[in-house]
């Protein structure tokens, strides 16, 4: 796999839906599956392992919505996504979803069997967190595909493989046949291959492409600090240097990309404050009331933190209403970082470019997390989402304040330390509560830790070691506390009652008989 990219793995994708590891990743898996069938699909069997996270969460957390949108060829921010189950049924595609006992090691494993009148193919993929995914097998043959390349797949009888001018050519042995996987910056020509029995072209689904010989200046916080030495380069600038190497961008291009994301986030905040509605939802519009009381001076005075809480709440409401958000680093934790950065920057009178630089700083902290661990709550609990968001936001806020590189890193360490052990237990199986409170907690934690770091509080534990500690905690965490809706608040009587009510309401309102309601 290629090195982590800030714009692939950390700040993004731009999407709709409650969960990036469910919606956006499933959509990308669906897009690749669609390409595998040349866009012609009549029947799909979707299988989820009984011991994974998906049997209980695939409908309510958006896997169905995302997967079906991908099978239709849509983008992750397409306004039609909430209706993708019905749209797929109207397109004549039959969907079956079954639970199986296959012992998949990853909790977010998708097993797809796709058919049309001419052919059948099987694809196995995993969602790795924050909208990222990996294809790990096609037609029973293990392989690796992260969506960053133009992938040309060639089926032929076992024998000599043709050569191609490409980044990588891999020959996969399927027994009586072989699949030749060609990774390149563009699809390769397959003319003049008499032994080929089938050719498939799978287009990239990531915004920053992969390439051969890719090198980044560092992959850990310790390496970054050692590389910078005594120069005390601002964290945002080191982030820009990292992404310039990763994506072959100029510094200006990196900053402008992030400014574009900041503008999307500010529009989303405004949309949330204006009011949002969505039927299949636990919480209604609450940020408007908070704003009215804040404007009237009737809330406790906590300075810029009140504006941050307002923005966090607005962003979470947009997410819950299937509006456009940015997974930063995930959809479930999409509000803490941008709410903290934009809210504080506005309070300080700073520009969108200042916001973008702070977001870049946060992105590099996220790179260090994603490189050695995960953002997926299904793997690490909410400490992987909310904890990461808090750490990233703390580093960003120190950057906004003009703090030093060591102070930014110290803030990230302090913030992550206080989030270890956080479980994932969504009420009524929706990614709304206690996710809202955890996003507010992450942002508030980030503000406090940023100020502590600016005052040179000692974090004691280096940032990389904090990430490793969180990873170790996740291995000791019961499956029921890692986003399976089998523990914590998710199984309280009140939560189960809300889930039943929403399920009955959805079944009553949807008369199509689509897979999502069966």
Image (cartoon, helix red, strand yellow):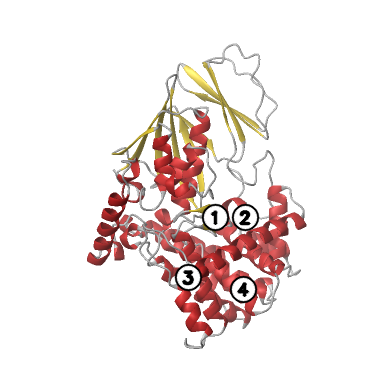
Q: What is the number of the mark on residue 6?
A: 2
CA separation, marks 3 and 4? 19 Å
In this rendering, the label closer to the viewer, 3 or 4: 3
- The structure residue drawn at horizontal position 60% and vertical position 41%, both measured from the top left corner, is 148
Sequence-wise, which precedes: disc 3 or disc 1?
3
CA separation, marks 2 and 4? 18 Å
Element type at marker 3? helix
**Which residue matches tag 3?**
313
Few, some or many residues within 10 Å of mark 1 (<14, 14–19, 20+): many
Q: Does 183 sit above or below residue 214?
A: above
Q: Is residue 460 visible?
A: no
| Residue 378 pos. (x, y %) | 40, 54
Sequence-wise, which precedes: disc 1 or disc 2?
2
Element type at marker 1? helix
Q: Residue furthest top?
A: 194
| Residue 193 pos. (x, y %) | 62, 14
In contact (CB < 8 Å): disc 3 and disc 1: no
In contact (CB < 8 Å): disc 3 and disc 4: no
Q: Does 378 sit above or below residue 35?
A: below
In this rendering, the label closer to the viewer, 3 or 1: 3
In contact (CB < 8 Å): disc 1 and disc 2: no
The quarter in which the C terminus is drawn is top left
Give residue 161's quadrant in the image: top right
Few, some or many residues within 10 Å of mark 4 (<14, 14–19, 20+): many
Q: What is the number of the mark on residue 397?
A: 4
Q: Is residue 347 visible?
A: yes
Quick one: 510 or 460, which is closer to the camera? 510
- The structure residue drawn at horizontal position 50% and vertical position 57%, both measured from the top left corner, is 323
**Which residue matches tag 1?**
370
- The structure residue drawn at horizontal position 37% and vertical position 64%, both measured from the top left corner, is 423
């Amino acid at each position: 796999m290629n090195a982590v990219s800030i714009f692939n793995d950390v700040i993004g994708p731009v999407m709709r839906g409650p969960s990036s590891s469910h919606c956006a990743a499933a959509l990308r898996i669906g897009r690749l599956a669609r390409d595998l069938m040349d866009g012609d699909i009549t029947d799909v069997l979707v299988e989820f392992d009984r011991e994974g996270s998906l049997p209980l969460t695939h409908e309510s957390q958006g896997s169905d919505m995302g997967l079906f949108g991908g099978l239709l060829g849509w983008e992750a921010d397409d306004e039609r996504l909430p209706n993708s189950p019905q749209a797929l049924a109207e397109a004549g595609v039959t969907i079956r979803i079954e639970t199986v006992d296959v012992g998949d090691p990853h909790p977010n494993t998708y097993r797809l069997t796709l058919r049309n009148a001419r052919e059948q193919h099987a694809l196995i993929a995993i969602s790795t967190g924050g909208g990222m995914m990996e294809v790990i097998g096609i037609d029973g043959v293990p392989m690796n595909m992260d969506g960053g390349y133009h992938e040309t797949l060639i089926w032929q009888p076992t024998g000599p493989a043709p050569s191609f001018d490409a980044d990588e050519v891999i020959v996969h042995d399927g027994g009586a046949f072989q699949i030749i996987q060609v990774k390149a910056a563009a699809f390769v020509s397959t003319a003049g291959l008499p032994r080929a029995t089938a050719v498939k072209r799978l287009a990239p689904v990531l915004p920053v492409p992969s390439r051969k010989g890719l090198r980044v200046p560092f992959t850990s916080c310790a390496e970054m600090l050692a590389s910078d030495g005594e120069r005390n380069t601002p964290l945002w600038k080191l982030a820009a240097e990292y992404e310039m190497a990763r994506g072959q961008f100029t510094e200006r291009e990196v900053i402008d990309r992030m400014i574009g994301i900041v503008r999307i986030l500010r529009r989303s905040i405004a949309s949330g404050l204006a009011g949002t509605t969505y039927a299949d939802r636990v919480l209604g519009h609450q940020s408007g009331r908070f704003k009215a009381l804040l404007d009237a001076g009737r809330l406790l005075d906590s300075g810029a933190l009140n504006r941050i809480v307002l923005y966090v709440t607005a962003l979470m409401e947009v997410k819950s209403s299937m509006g456009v958000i940015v997974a930063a680093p995930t959809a479930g934790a999409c509000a803490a970082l941008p709410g903290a950065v934009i809210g504080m920057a506005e309070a300080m009178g700073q520009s969108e470019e200042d916001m973008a630089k702070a977001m870049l700083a946060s992105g590099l902290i996220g790179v260090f997390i994603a490189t050695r661990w995960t953002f997926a709550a299904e793997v690490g609990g909410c400490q992987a989402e909310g904890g990461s968001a808090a750490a990233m936001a703390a580093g960003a806020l120190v950057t906004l304040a003009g703090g030093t590189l060591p102070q930014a890193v110290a803030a990230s360490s302090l913030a992550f330390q206080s989030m270890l052990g956080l479980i994932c237990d969504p009420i009524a199986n929706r990614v709304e509560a206690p996710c809202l409170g955890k996003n507010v907690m992450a942002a508030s934690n980030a503000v406090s830790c940023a100020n502590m770091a600016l005052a040179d509080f000692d974090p004691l534990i280096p940032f990389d070691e904090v990430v490793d500690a969180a990873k170790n905690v996740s291995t000791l965490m019961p499956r029921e506390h890692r986003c399976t809706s089998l523990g914590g608040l998710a199984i309280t009587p009140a939560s189960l009652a809300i889930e039943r009510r929403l399920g009955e309401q959805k079944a009553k309102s949807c008369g199509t008989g689509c897979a999502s309601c069966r």
